[in-house]
Image: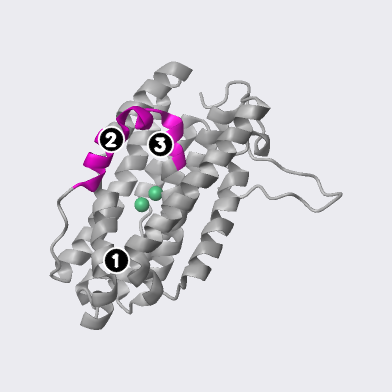
């Protein structure tokens, strides 16, 4: 299996451009299975190891992320099933199931940290009410993959900030694990979007790109407004957060261009 690359940057002039192949669903499932058995050890014996001062800065935000990571993924799964049936790739459902399981492991690890710090977990699922409003919209795989990749781009910045904001060995190790997992997650979503966008005409391509930028502005603002205290504790000013968000998302955008890949005869199958 070739090394995972998030970026498919332009090569220096004169150098050969090596484009990766889009992984099949079976390759993604194999990756997720292998990764599940390759976890970092979390040094729980030391307890939460977080000071009240540190905790005060990050706790509200961490509870919200913990809940988000814990979502049961049933709607994403239903959307993936419909998508897989449409493109004739039943293996995609398995890959999505394993992806959801990995996200739930993140939620569980964060949940255990909150338990150890004697912080109650949040139970209410805000996503439920949002989903009811945007139901029709969110039944499309393209919309899911787009929203998820944007949130994962912010997760990279967020968990790096949390890691900087605490001296807790447990929490820092959990952040390391999540950061390690999220890079391939972004690649997974970008490949799916490249598959979906493949063959899209120029006008629709431009409209897609424009609507993604609008969505990204909204999500970036929402993440800052909702989590600025923790992000600040991790060293982000708004300006720095904004700049880093767009830089990371720029890499994801390059990785979701169909032209960034070599295509097997039956892509995604
Ligand atoms: Fe995650
Ligand atoms: Fe993720």
Marking on residue 133 = 2
Q: Is residue 140 above or below residue 231?
A: above
Q: In this image, 243 relative to 51: left or right?
A: right
Nearer-the-camera pick, 176 or 71:
71
> Which residues, given as a range, are shown in magenta?
125-146
As measured in the structure, the alpha-carbon distance from the residue carrying label 3 to the one carrying label 2 is 15 Å
Q: Are marks 2 and 1 in contact (CB under 8 Å)?
A: no
Q: Secondary structure at mark 3?
A: helix
Q: Residues within 10 Å of mark 1 (few under 14, many from 20)?
A: some
- Does the rendering let one see residue 155? yes
The image shows residue 258 at horizontal and vertical percentages of 63, 34
Q: Mark 3 or mark 2: which is in front?
A: 2
Residue on which the image places disc 1? 42
The image shows residue 53 at horizontal and vertical percentages of 25, 82
Query: Which residue corresponds to the image point at 29% horizontal and 57% vertical from the top-left?
Result: 65
The image quarter in which residue 47 lies: bottom left
Nearer-the-camera pick, 125 or 251:
125
Query: Which residue corresponds to the image point at 16% horizontal and 59% vertical from the top-left?
Result: 121
């Amino acid at each position: 299996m070739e090394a995972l690359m998030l970026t498919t940057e332009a090569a220096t002039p004169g150098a050969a451009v090596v484009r990766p192949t889009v992984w099949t669903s079976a390759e993604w499932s194999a990756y997720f299975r292998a990764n599940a058995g390759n976890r970092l050890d979390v040094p729980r014996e030391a307890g939460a190891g977080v000071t009240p001062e540190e905790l005060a800065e990050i706790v509200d935000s961490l509870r919200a992320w913990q809940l988000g990571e814990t979502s049961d993924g049933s709607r994403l799964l239903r959307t993936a099933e419909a998508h897989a049936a449409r493109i004739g790739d039943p293996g995609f459902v398995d890959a999505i199931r394993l992806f959801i399981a990995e996200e739930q492991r993140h939620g569980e690890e964060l949940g255990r940290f909150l338990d150890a710090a004697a912080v109650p977990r949040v139970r209410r699922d805000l996503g439920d009410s949002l989903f009811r409003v945007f139901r029709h919209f969110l039944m499309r795989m393209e919309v899911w993959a787009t929203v998820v990749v944007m949130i994962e781009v912010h997760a990279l910045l967020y968990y790096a900030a949390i890691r900087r904001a605490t001296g807790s060995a447990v929490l820092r190790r959990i952040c390391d694990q999540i950061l390690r997992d999220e890079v391939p997650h972004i690649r997974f979503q970008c490949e799916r979007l490249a598959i979906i966008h493949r063959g899209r005409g120029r006008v629709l391509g431009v409209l897609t790109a424009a609507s993604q930028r609008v969505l990204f502005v909204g999500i970036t603002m929402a993440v800052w407004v909702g989590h600025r205290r923790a992000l600040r504790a991790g060293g982000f000013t708004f300006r720095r957060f904004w700049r880093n968000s767009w830089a990371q998302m720029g890499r994801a955008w390059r990785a979701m261009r169909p032209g960034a890949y070599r295509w097997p005869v039956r892509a995604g199958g």
